[in-house]
């Protein structure tokens, strides 16, 4: 049994049965809602506004007839008063120049030849006479038309009326049994009716079972304004009006039609509510069962999508809503044709045919709705709703692909959507399509919210990236920017920043490792070379003291002595450079006359300078006292002068300046290079770099690097400037 039910549950038969139930529920709900919409909230026709308004209209017409139209003089132009004509024209008689109601003819004669300016409020007598004639003609015409209206309105099969002018005795009635003497009998008959109207100048009363149901205060005049452009009837007790419906209504007027419809509605009132409850119950049960099996052939089985299901949600909506609209419009048109008896191809009554057409349209509407909702449910079950909804897909694509390159196109797209939605909203508002205007407005609101959220997120991402950049700038190379919720437009920048930190950290680590390796290598090699080199020099010194007659051997010993001492100097430079690079050089700073120290160092180097034919010129020497290490500073000057001797052009001047500049002590050495300097100044300060590429000089390329290191150890700064062949060294110490 259970297996059979599982197979049946997901079968086409089961789904067809559920679809039929949904159609049945739709028919019940549609008919019930229509019934409730037209269902009168009163318990009888005589309590409805339709009856009360219609019957009071008839009473008002009878009132006007008995008061005005029984007098044939009402249609006599000569009986139209000046006051009535003036009210018709909308003017005040007092504003007519020369008007005298007691001497009207005389006034006309006196003013007939005069030319008086006519304004909106002032008329001459002649002009008033002309306008009055037109007014009288219009009044008579209107009265005749209104009289015809009264006759047409009262010429209805279901109205009985009796009206009597108490002063004149005039009677207006459509009672066939009236003979002129039985007025009291007819009045008593009206008062015995279940429903009737009694009206006069004081009141207009609607009676039900002998009791007043509605009281129109002020009488019939308060409800029906005098048609003759006046204030109505001044005398209120001269007439009385009775109006009622016949006991048995017959076809031929709105009373019969309205009562028939309301009686039918009241007869099925309980059935309508029962049908509504049953329809809701069937719709809920069948709907839930349908949603559980739609799109599946078995429990948790594959979801089958038809051609309609493969369309995007927005396209389905654009097809569904117009189709549903066409169905309802077609239903209304068909019902109108049926009820007007223009379409009755198979016989039967208009009501029966109308019910069939209406229910057929309901089945179509339910089918469209089931198809639309089923497609949504299928995609939810299948987990493909993100691909199904085009706007979600587009938003996801924008979020994933909104880079710096696509951002301008996104901005343009948003602007175009703004313009389109605004245009639709304005156009539909002007054309009176309230729903479309509302939808356009809601679209703009959603778009504003979306743009605002994206903008806020972009600002937050930018602040996070800026914070990460600041951390990297102060040396925190491990600073990272969270990428989990970062928008694609900022994700590339954030990812690049994260990689920059990694790259810088890796580069710094590699540089430190390389520098440490070089330093250790230099230190170890220098130490390994120092011991055998000392022995070599010692043996060379011993050989020099031996009596050797061979001149060639003595020449070779001299060369060995020179080369070994040069090698010794190189090793010492290497050790010194290594110490400076590793920070192992200590400086004992003491106040020192740097000008005297420079002059002393130059004096010790005079012989070598003269050998190179170089002339020292002290261009500017001031007394300068700064805290420095004299031993290290002498080594710096010695290295710089050695560099001058090696690379300066012979027979040139070397300029040396020592002076104070603001809060700094400056030492400047300038010379002309003998070789072209095809190298940047900063590169010359690196270790093992020489100013000439031939490497024919005895330099090691360490002199300037050692000098800079020693200056920095003392808290100073050494810089180079190269301008063509001009070579300039600048040393600065803060006071």
Image: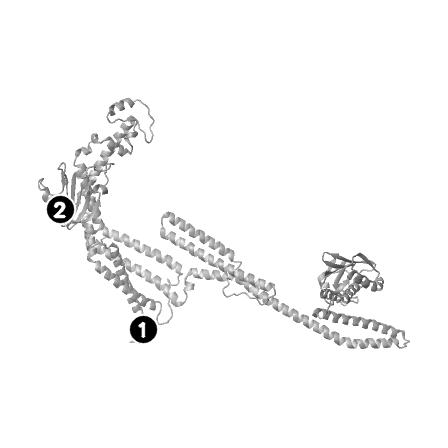
Say if residue 728 shows up in the picture: no
Q: Choose between 605 and 666: the one closer to the eye.
A: 666
Task: Give above or below for 111 relative to 716.
Answer: above
Give the secondary structure at mark 2: helix
Q: Quadrant of residue 611?
A: bottom right
Q: Is the residue marked by circle 2 packed among few (<14), some (14-19), or many (20+) residues within 10 Å? A: many
| Residue closer to the observer: 321 or 660 | 660
* Residue at the image position 30 percent from the left and 65 percent from the top: 284
Question: Alpha-carbon neighbours of circle 1 within 10 Å: few (<14), some, or many (≥20)?
Answer: some
Image depth: mark 2 or mark 1 in front: 2
User: Quarter of the image containing the N terminus?
Assistant: bottom left
Q: How many marks?
A: 2
Please tell me which of labels 2 and 1 falls first in the chain.
Answer: 1
For residue 190, the mark is 2
Looking at the image, residue 281 lies above or below residue 136: below
Q: Position of residue 182 (x, y in %)?
A: 9, 42
Q: Position of residue 108 (x, y in %)?
A: 27, 24
């Amino acid at each position: 049994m259970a297996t059979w039910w599982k197979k049946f549950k997901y079968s086409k038969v089961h789904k067809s049965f559920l679809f039929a139930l949904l159609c049945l529920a739709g028919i019940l709900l549609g008919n019930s809602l229509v019934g409730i919409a037209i269902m009168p909230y009163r318990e009888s026709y005589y309590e409805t506004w339709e009856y009360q308004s219609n019957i009071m209209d008839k009473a008002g017409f009878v009132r006007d007839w008995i008061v005005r139209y029984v007098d044939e003089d009402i249609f006599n132009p000569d009986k139209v008063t000046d006051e009535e004509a003036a009210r018709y024209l909308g003017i005040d008689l007092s504003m007519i120049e020369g008007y005298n109601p007691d001497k009207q003819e005389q006034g006309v004669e006196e003013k007939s030849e005069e030319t008086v300016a006519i304004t909106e409020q002032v008329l001459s007598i002649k002009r008033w006479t002309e306008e009055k004639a037109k007014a009288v003609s219009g009044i008579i015409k209107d009265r005749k038309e209104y009289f015809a209206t009264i006759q047409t309105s009262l010429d209805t099969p279901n109205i009985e009326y009796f009206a009597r002018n108490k002063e004149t005795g005039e009677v207006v009635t459509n009672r066939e049994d009236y003979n002129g003497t039985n007025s009291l009998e007819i009045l008593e008959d009206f008062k015995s009716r279940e429903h009737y109207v009694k009206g006069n100048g004081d009141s207009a009363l609607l009676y039900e079972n002998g009791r007043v149901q509605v009281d129109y205060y002020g009488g019939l005049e308060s409800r029906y304004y005098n048609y003759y452009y006046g204030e109505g009837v001044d005398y209120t007790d001269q007439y009385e009006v009775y109006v009622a419906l016949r006991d048995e209504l017959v076809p031929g007027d709105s009373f019969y039609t309205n009562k028939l419809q309301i009686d039918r509605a009241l007869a099925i009132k309980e059935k309508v509510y029962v049908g509504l409850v049953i329809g809701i119950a069937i719709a809920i049960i069948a709907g839930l069962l349908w949603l559980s099996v739609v799109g599946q052939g078995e429990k948790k089985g594959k979801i089958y999508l038809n051609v309609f299901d493969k369309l995007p949600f927005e396209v389905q909506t654009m097809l569904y809503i117009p189709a549903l609209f066409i169905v309802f419009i077609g239903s209304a048109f068909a019902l109108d044709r049926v009820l007007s008896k223009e379409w009755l191809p198979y016989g039967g009554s208009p009501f029966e045919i109308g019910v069939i057409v209406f229910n057929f349209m309901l089945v179509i509407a339910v089918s469209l709705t089931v198809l639309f909702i089923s497609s949504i449910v299928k995609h939810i079950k299948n987990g493909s709703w993100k691909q199904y909804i085009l706007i979600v897909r587009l938003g996801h694509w924008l979020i994933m692909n909104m880079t710096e390159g696509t951002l301008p196109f996104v901005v343009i797209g948003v602007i175009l959507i703004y313009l389109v939605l605004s245009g639709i909203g304005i156009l539909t508002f002007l054309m009176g399509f309230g729903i479309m205007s509302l939808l356009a407005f809601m679209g703009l609101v959603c778009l504003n919210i979306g743009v605002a959220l994206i903008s806020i997120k972009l600002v937050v991402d930018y602040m996070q990236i800026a914070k990460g950049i600041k951390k990297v700038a102060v040396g925190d190379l491990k600073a990272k920017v969270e990428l989990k919720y970062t928008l694609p437009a900022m994700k590339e920048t954030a990812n690049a920043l994260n990689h920059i930190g990694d790259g810088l950290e890796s580069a710094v680590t590699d540089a430190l490792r390389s520098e440490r390796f070089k330093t250790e290598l230099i230190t170890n090699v220098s130490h390994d070379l120092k011991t055998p080199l000392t022995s070599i020099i010692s043996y060379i010194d011993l050989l020099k003291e031996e009596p050797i007659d061979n001149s060639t051997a003595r020449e070779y010993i001299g060369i060995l002595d020179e080369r070994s001492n040069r090698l010794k100097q190189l090793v010492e430079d290497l050790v010194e450079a290594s110490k400076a690079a590793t920070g192992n050089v200590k400086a004992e700073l003491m106040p020192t006359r740097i000008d005297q120290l420079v002059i002393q160092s130059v004096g010790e180097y005079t012989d070598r300078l003269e050998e190179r034919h170089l002339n020292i010129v002290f261009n500017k020497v001031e007394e300068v006292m700064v805290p420095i290490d004299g031993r290290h500073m002498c080594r710096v000057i010695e290295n710089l002068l050695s560099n001058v001797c090696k690379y300066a052009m012979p027979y040139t001047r070397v300029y040396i300046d020592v002076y104070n500049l603001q809060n700094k002590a400056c030492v400047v050495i300038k010379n002309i290079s003998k070789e072209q300097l095809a190298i940047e100044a900063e590169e010359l300060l690196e270790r093992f770099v020489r100013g000439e590429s031939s490497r024919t000089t005895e330099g090691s390329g360490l002199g300037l690097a050692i000098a800079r290191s020693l200056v920095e150890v003392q808290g100073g700064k050494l810089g180079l400037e190269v301008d063509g062949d001009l070579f300039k060294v600048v040393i600065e110490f803060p006071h």
